[in-house]
Amino acid sequence: MKTIRRLLYKEVLSAVVFVALGFLALFFFFDFIDELRDLGKPGSANYDMLRLLLVVALMIPSHLYELLPIAVLIGTIFVMARLAQSSEYTILRTSGLGPWRALQTLLIMAFGFVVLTFAVGDYLAPATDRASQLVKAPFVGAISIGQTGAWLKEKQGNNSSAVNVGALKAGRSMENIRIFEFDERGRLSASVQAASGSFTPDNKAWELTKVRRTVFDTSNNEQASVQRTQLDSLRWPTEISAEMVSTALLKPDRMRTIDLYQYITHLEANGQSAQRYEIEFWRKVFYPISCIVMVVLALPFAYLHFRSGGIATYVFGGVMAGISFFLLNNVFGYIGNLQNWQPWLTAAAPGLIYSVLSLGAFGWLVLKR
């Protein structure tokens, strides 16, 4: 059995690597074409071809994380179908490789892909994606979302604050900051506008520069007074850390699982909706497990009877199945967010659907025939 396992692992691993490299090369080309539009823009004269290639290269781990389950499916289907076409799998079956033993052998390999997918998605991809943004930001522009940036909320004793960060620049500095402070009765007590700001080393305050602070004195119910001051700098105490601002400004699917969990806790503690981030959190939990589903879905292809040249049709079917899983995974995320479904169920639904399909195919093609 060691020889059989070594044969299967070698063939499947080489096929998965080949498929993954092919997809990554395609995505690298698309990213390269997309980034070319930033060359020669006003204010981006120093953004040259070398930096562009570095930015595109740093995007590769994020694409690898997204493509690994699909590559595992296509690579395993190709190997299983090729072994069946050449009658090698028939020889392996007569050598003692029964259906359950074959499934067990492939599942052990699938657990390795699960660990790899989790490591890439939780450690390598977030670090490289943030690095690519910070490499590009000084030459093309700051990191932002939409027209107004990111909004955050924080409770400070009986008071609360609503914070708007326009953009995050290289070096973890912020720009276009607006802070609205409310008293215990929910009335606006002060507002702060700052051109830029940075995080203190202990993440307990922000250092704001070019500040315009407006204080509303509402103690007199008949007439409220307004005081405006201009400050060169202001230290604003807050528990909103750099990671929270990054999570709000960057795509949540590119963040680490622990960062998403901490941000969800912050949102819930401040009475804000965390539905979108909860879905992304559970997607990052369940997505690596889809490698197991893909391996089980590919095993029945070893029990099909192929004519000469018929293998291409089944490999194409595997490509379509992988793409459909990717699309279904994204569609369920959007629908679950709109319909307010349970986050864990929304994230697990595509994997559960494909698990049922793979087990059904395994039972029909392998056990019943």
Image: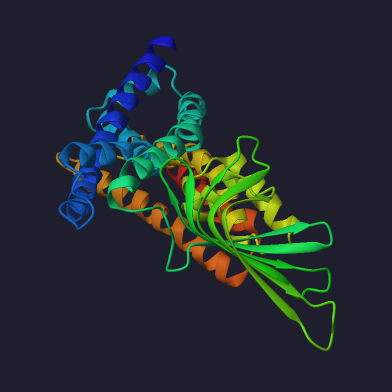
Q: Nearer the viewer, residue 2 or 117?
A: 117
Residue 332 vs 138, above or below: the answer is below
Q: Nearer the viewer, residue 160 or 277?
A: 160
Q: Nearer the viewer, residue 305 or 172?
A: 172
Q: Is residue 145 toward the left or the right of residue 283 in the image?
A: left
Q: Is residue 308 toward the left or the right of residue 293 in the image?
A: left
- Name the residue: 43% across, 57% down: 144
Give how far across and how far down residue 224 sits, in percent. 76, 82
Give how far across and how far down residue 65 sits, in percent. 41, 39
Residue at the extreme top of the image, as rendered: 2
Q: Quadrant of residue 125?
A: top left
Q: Is residue 191 toward the left or the right of residue 330 in the image?
A: right
Q: Is residue 139 visible?
A: yes
Give how far across and how far down residue 207 sits, in percent. 58, 47
- Name the residue: 44% across, 61% down: 145
- Name the residue: 32% across, 38% down: 60
- Name the residue: 69% across, 47% down: 239
Residue 225 vs 302, above or below: the answer is below
